[in-house]
Amino acid sequence: MFRLGLEQQPCLCHVPPMAKRTPMAGGFLLMAAILIGAVWGVAGGNPMKGILIGTGVGIGVALLIWLLDSRRRS
């Protein structure tokens, strides 16, 4: 049968609520690691080295949080 899209849709208030789950996020820790690395690098006389080390540490922590969160969902 041909439909025009004007059929009644089910009422959204009768749909069971979605499960509440707050995912963990590592973005703040990535940013904090980069900033701490930059400050450490400036204090040591090589800011770029500090930024790169901070970025590496931040990526590692963010990946760890992502892995823990994905295991928590399973």
Image (cartoon, rainbow, N blue to C red):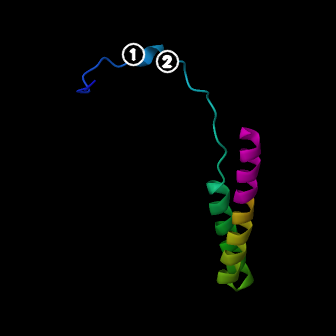
* Label of residue 11 in the image: 1
Name the residue: 26% across, 27% down. 5
The residue tagged with tag 2: helix, strand or loop?
Answer: loop
**In magenta segment, residue 8:** no
The residue tagged with tag 1: helix, strand or loop?
Answer: loop
Which residue lies most toward the bottom here? Answer: 45
* Label of residue 15 in the image: 2
Please name the predominant secondary structure of the magenta segment in the image. helix
Tell me the magenta residue range. Answer: 62-74
**In magenta segment, residue 68:** yes
Res. 53 image quadrant: bottom right
Name the residue: 74% across, 82% down. 44
Q: Position of residue 36 (x, y in %)?
A: 69, 67
Which residue lies most toward the front here? Answer: 1
Res. 51 image quadrant: bottom right
How many C-alpha atoms fall within 10 Å of the one at disc 2: few (<14), some, or many (≥20)? Answer: few
Looking at the picture, tell me which residue is in the foreground, 31 or 10.
Answer: 10
